[in-house]
Image (cartoon, helix red, strand yellow):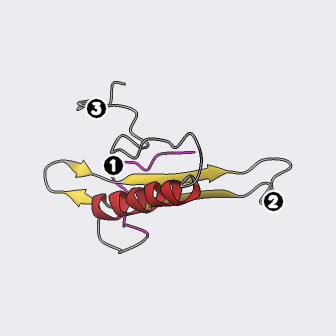
């Protein structure tokens, strides 16, 4: 799935704001999926760009859904702020 070029104006799919940060370019998160053979949505591709507040609001919602779905499990996942994070202090996208 292609990343938008720096010339493209990316608007948040939820609130509609321009995701450009003056002097720093586009700052957005993406939720994406490509469904394959055997899935209910075979051949469908999705990509949703989110501004920072909407991204973290969505992440908080997903964290809450995980908490609800595992509430009565014997081995409950820890409910922490690391949910979905793959790197920290990665200022230049090197990880």
Q: Report, in whole angstroms, how far the alpha carbon at label 2 lies from the one at label 1.
A: 34 Å
Crowd class of label 1 (few under 14; some 14 to 19; many from 20; radius 10 Å):
few
Residue at x 77%, y 54% (from the top left corner): 43
In this figure, which residue is indicated by the disc labeled 3? 88
Residue at left offset 80%, top offset 55% = 42
Residue occupied by mark 2: 40
Q: Are marks 1 and 3 in contact (CB under 8 Å)?
A: no
Q: Nearer the viewer, residue 77 or 7?
A: 77
Residue 65 appears at what percent x and percent y? 51, 60
Quarter of the figure with residue 28: bottom left
Where, quadrant-wise, is the C terminus in this rendering? top left
Q: Are marks 2 and 1 in contact (CB under 8 Å)?
A: no
* Name of the residue lying farthest toward the bottom: 15
Image location (x, y in percent) of residue 55: 37, 58
Name the mark nearer the viewer: 1 or 3: 3
12 vs 73, left or right, is left
Q: Secondary structure at mark 3?
A: loop
* Secondary structure state at the residue bearing disc 2: loop
Residue pictured at 45% horizontal, 60% vertical: 64
Does residue 25 show up magenta in the picture? no
- Magenta extent: 1-13
Q: Which residue bears the numbered disc 1?
A: 6
Query: What secondary structure is the stretch in magenta mostly built from?
Result: loop
Q: Earlier in the sequence, mark 2 or mark 1?
A: 1
Nearer the observer, disc 2 or disc 1?
2
- Alpha carbon distance from label 2 to label 3: 35 Å
């Amino acid at each position: 799935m292609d990343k938008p070029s720096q010339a493209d104006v990316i608007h948040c799919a939820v609130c509609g704001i321009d995701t450009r940060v003056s002097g720093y370019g586009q700052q957005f998160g993406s939720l994406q999926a490509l469904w394959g053979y055997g899935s209910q949505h075979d051949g469908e591709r999705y990509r949703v760009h989110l501004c920072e507040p909407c991204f973290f609001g969505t992440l908080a919602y997903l964290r809450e859904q995980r908490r609800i779905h595992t509430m009565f499990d014997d081995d409950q996942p820890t409910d922490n702020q690391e949910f979905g994070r793959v790197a920290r202090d990665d200022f230049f996208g090197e990880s």
